Amino acid sequence: MKRAFGALALLLCIAACSQSAQSTSSSSAAPSPQATNPIDFPLYSGSTVLTARDWHGSSGSGASVSGREVIAESSATLDTLEGWLHDVSVNPPAGFTVAASGSATDAAHRRAQAMGLQFQVFSHQVGTKTRGLVVVVLDPVTFEAKAGPVLSLIDKYSMLPQSFRDPIDQQAKARTGFTVSQALDPSQPIGAALAAARALRDSGQRGVVLVDAAKN
């Protein structure tokens, strides 16, 4: 079981994925209902859900992956949100366990903190399937300032052949600690932060993101 948790954490935190989001329709005749959190993991108290969507993609090995993403905003400081994340990591909600630890994970946390975000990876069982949950808290202003060199490449990146993507990924990782491929993957802490930064642009709020995922 520990190996399964470790493999899933590796999938969520390391593998580069391509992804496409399911679009949701809206009616111009009436305002959309307030989004709610469909994931069985509590958000920071007082957070307001901005978006909740399904997504699907594939891992670098070709495995199909799908899940849900929730983006919420909070007026709490990043220090407060990091304290909350630490507390739920020490005492996870019922049914959840921390899925990754060790020197590599510690290094990833240090890189994340330098980018204005922090994360934790949990695992939980749904029926016979092990699912992974990435929880990210961030200050979008700091994140966008730090991630600027990579953000400018994202729109064009997906149209490039693989032979052109590899050197761009290497350059991006050398400058920021993560690749463009990771920034395009919602199950990665960086990808989740990017989605939240876009949703929170000009709001002046901090973000809390939940991304629940599993192999299909």
Image (cartoon, rainbow, N blue to C red):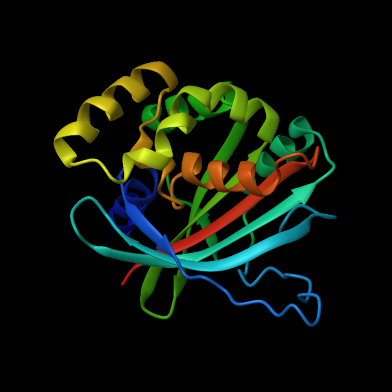
**Residue 116 visible in image:** no
Count all numbered tags in the image, as a single digit. Answer: 0
Which residue is at 14% across, 35% downward?
163
| Residue 88 place in picture, x, y as percent | 66, 49
The answer to whether 165 appears left or right of 210 in the picture is left
Front-most of residues 167 and 86: 167
**Residue 3 visible in image:** yes
| Residue 46 place in picture, x, y as percent | 85, 55
Which residue is at 54% across, 42% downward?
194
Which residue is at 83% across, 40% downward?
76
The answer to whether 145 appears left or right of 9 in the picture is right
Front-most of residues 182 and 163: 163
Residue 103: image quadrant is: top left
The quadrant of the image that shows the C terminus is bottom left
Q: Residue furthest top?
A: 175
Front-most of residues 195 and 68: 195
Front-most of residues 154 and 58: 154
| Residue 1 place in picture, x, y as percent | 32, 61
Seen in the picture, residue 148 relative to 74 is either above or below; the reply is above
Q: Residue furthest front?
A: 28
Which residue is at 79% across, 42% downward?
203
Seen in the picture, residue 114 relative to 67 is either above or below; the reply is above
Seen in the picture, residue 155 relative to 106 is either above or below; the reply is below
Residue 32: image quadrant is: bottom right
The answer to whether 158 appears left or right of 111 in the picture is left
The answer to whether 205 appears left or right of 171 in the picture is right
| Residue 215 place in picture, x, y as percent | 32, 66
